[in-house]
Amino acid sequence: MTTLDQSETQRDNPDVADLTARRFQRMRPFGGRPAPRVDTSGLPPGPRWPVWAQSVALIRFRHRFVPRMWRRYGDVFTVRILSGGRPLVLFTRPEHAKEIFAGDPEIFHAGKGNAILGPVMGEHSLLLQDGREHKRARSLLMPAFNGHALRGYRGLVDEVARDQVAQWRPDEEFRSLDRMNALTLEVILRVVFGVTDERRLASLRPCVNRTVNVSPAVLLGWGYPVLQRFGPWKRTVDNAYRLDRLMYAEIRERRRATDLAERTDVLSRLIRAGEEGDEGDRLTDEELRDQLVTLLLAGHETTASALAWALHELGSDPSLLARARSAAREADDDYLEAVLKESMRLHPVIPMVVRTLMRPSTIGGWRLPAGATVGPSILIAHSRADNHPDPERFDPERFLGQNPPVNTWIPFGGGVRRCIGAGFSLLEGVAVLRAILTAYDVAAVGADEPRVRNITSVPRHGSRVRLTRSE
Ligand code: HEM
């Protein structure tokens, strides 16, 4: 087993360093190409502000901006975004979401919108691919997230959740978002990557944390390779070399593991999935690396944010907390899952999902040009009173023994791009809530509100809570 000195840049393994360097060359944000021109006549209404102001409003102040646009312009509106004032048409009704989710994947591309993540995730990433490549990758990954596989993860997820919670001290006040991030990271490393060696885990944690915390400014800087020699860009590139070396070491060792056939982690399942199929289905080391980093980035902070909000809501309402604690003690997972789902409804982690049109298409009666980006607003879908009566109220009962009407609750998107980790995140969230609530009383400390962090929304103050031990 290789152990790593944190000070190494890890460029000394030529084989792996080559793979990393090639990724940086190939994966410039937006593919190094200028955005295509879009015919903007006849689009749904929208603000006439300068493009930069609309982009900033959408990215930084989406929680106020999008509802304001909805009230001002109605159920379908257009926002102009950088680069080049490209139109983003947002839809807010369930029937619109249905049309978009059911759109032909050859025409409704999702990978384009994620291109900025290319240098980190890599070209094989499920999130970045479209069309036939996406279909192939998805069919290889899906078995690792189906019901049978999820049942196989349950024991280890429970164990990691209990171990982590057992290390907390009672009567402390803390930012639950930070604790949840540490916890979901541990779940990814052990259950998804399947790493068990303590020394490798210790090397991976800081690398993975730095990868997750990469800022949009650093990502955009990748369009200018010269920047990679300076400041935060250099640190990020060095970290990428280090992470890749650890990941490739893990992947190569795992391929040779004598217990590969019995292992239940996602990486081992992906290796086996390829070996059971024909030659074309075999995932290369590079593909495995890209998919693992994708699962890490997509599955870590998202679940942590949903959990932090759930604790905030339970900690603000003693009667709900009492109900959730008895559910935890009685292993009533349905109620805990309802708490999590309601937390994702009231505080959507991802505000919208988008598709770029490869050909002119009609949605909600609007004829839209090729090159336009379209998407359902999750924020509005979850806060419309005609979708969810009394929408401001946190009420898990909405999800008990029933589901809200179709396409009114869409935290995981939909169609062929629906979040592959939806079931995993619910399983994990329930395990974490159960571990916390069987041991502790939770009290929220102060109010909180959403804040944009990269792509996700998180509680601005980290959802501060105080836990007290109680039997
Ligand atoms: C609260 C937790 C989570 C939320 C709210 C969430 C949300 C989303 C959303 C909105 C999408 C885009 C769907 C679309 O375009 O229609 C997505 C895609 C994805 N998510 Fe999640 N996610 C969560 C947890 C996870 C976890 C735990 C994993 C993996 C371990 C994961 C892996 C992925 C992947 C790989 C995709 C890309 C799917 C594709 O393009 O085919 N997510 N997620």
Image: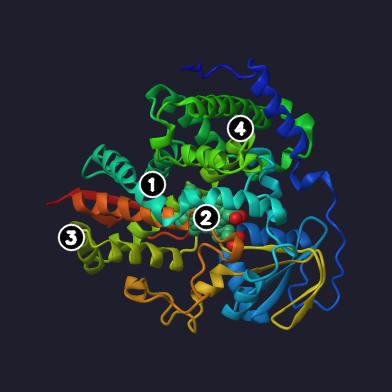
How far separated are the C-alphas under marks 1 and 2?
21 Å
Q: CA distance from mark 3 to mark 1?
A: 23 Å
- Residue on which the image places disc 4: 285
Residue type at mark 2?
Ile
Nearer-N-terminus badge (3/2): 3
Decide if ligand 1 comes within 8 Å of the CB at mark 1: no
Q: Earlier in the sequence, mark 3 or mark 1?
A: 1
Judging by the rendered image, the residue that carries numbered circle 3 is: 330
Identify the residue position indicated by label 2 in the image. Answer: 420
In terms of secondary structure, where does tag 3 sit? loop
Q: Is mark 2 within 8 Å of ligand 1?
A: yes
In space, the residues marked 4 and 3 are separated at their CA atoms by 44 Å
**What residue sits 57% from the left and 78% below the top?**
94
| Disc 3 residue type (three-letter) | Glu
* Residue ID for mark 1: 180
The Cα–Cα distance between marks 4 and 2, rounded to whole angstroms, is 21 Å
